[in-house]
Amino acid sequence: MKQVYLDNAATSFPKPPSVIAAVTHAVKTLGGNPGRSSHTLARAVADAVFDTREAVATMFGGEAERVVFTLSATHALNMAIRSLVPKNSHVLISNIEHNAVLRPIAALHEEGTSYSIYQSAGSSETLLSSLKKNLRPNTAAIVACHRSNILPIELPLKEIGAFAKAHGLHFIVDASQSAGVCEINSEAMGISALCAPFHKGLFGIRGGGFVLFGKTVKDETLAPLITGGSGSDSQSLFMPNALPDRLEAGTLPVEAILSLKAGIDFINEVGIENIRQKEETLSAYMRNRMLSLPSLRLYMANRPGGSSALFNLRGYSPSEVARLLDDCGIALREGLHCAPLAHRLSGTQTSGALRASVGYFNSKGDVDYLIDCLKRIPRRA
């Protein structure tokens, strides 16, 4: 049976051979913990980890020392939000935010912080107008999901960053669906905290994420989510003031970090614009083919861009269709996708929907097979 993977928005698959080789090399040859010992192996690991910080900083326009490694993008976003959104302040979030943002904001709301939701689906002018309308005297930050995980919506980071700078606000960006696919320059775009996982568009393995903090963010103001061993200033009862040690307690996921470096090297070799063009071209082909199926409803069908298609089949629940496609060897996701605001925008907050998300290693043949399998599903009224 043919196997087709169309769940790249959840985690990219397959991984480049160089990423697998980097993980294997780390497991086989790089013993020791970075920053914890002075022996040769520990120094080699520390150097490799710093090389990855430099690769992240170079790709996203920042400083290597301000790259903080985390367990995931969710961990990174919690860290950034807790650090840059003071209690009893106000924060602006978009109407496509993932639960990785929405739930930390809701927790802060329970503690006295308020929030407003700005509109993202229209033009840049409409978005900026919505930001201005919702601005309050105690607004401290703007959070932006750069790319929706279910809808073809991409927010204009440069324009939002300029708005944030003009009003003295922190700017937190969730780049979970855009890192490795879109050009992002944190300093040029006025980003205070750029958050992303290793395992999606950056081609690394699961188990890691990062925050790249901007130069204007003061290290000592950042709030550690966890405290413990940092490898420095061990006599103090408190975490060090300087990044990255201030926010990196405990042993780092070295194998995942080195997979990130290999993933970034792969992207640099292929070219980020080539990756984006291939994914968007394939996504447009998939969406156009879906429009030929009379029983299929494609959401935001006339909006270009993105790497995913959100859809339902008339007469079927998303879970029923997902099971039928799984029987054909097609892997995709059904349900609410941890994005209730975006589902509200598409009108699928009750029913949920299916998401087919292409990646760099997919082909038109994969899309054609998906369409053929969808055609085989008997039509219902």
Image: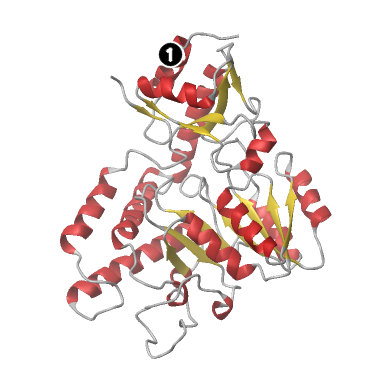
Left or right: 263 with respect to 274? left
In this view of the protein, which residue sits in the foreground, 299 or 286? 299
Question: Quadrant location of residue 316?
Answer: top right
User: Where in the figure is residue 291, as x and y percent of width and height?
Assistant: 58, 17
Q: What residue would you read off at disc 1?
A: 372
Left or right: 253 with respect to 368? left
Residue at the spot x=43%, y=46% of the render?
Answer: 200
All told, the count of numbered labels is: 1
Query: In the picture shown, does residue 370 fall above or below 294?
Result: below
- Figure quadrant of the N terminus: top left
Left or right: 36 with respect to 187? left
> For the view shown, which residue lies furthest in the left direction?
28
- Figure quadrant of the C terminus: top right
Query: In the picture shown, does residue 367 fall above or below 200?
Result: above
Q: Amino acid at mark 1?
A: Asp
Query: In the picture shown, does residue 59 fall above or below 272?
Result: below
Residue at the spot x=54%, y=59% of the render?
Answer: 77
Q: Secondary structure at mark 1?
A: helix
User: Where in the figure is residue 189, as x and y percent of width and height?
Assistant: 62, 58
Query: In the picture shown, does residue 53 fall above or below 8?
Result: below
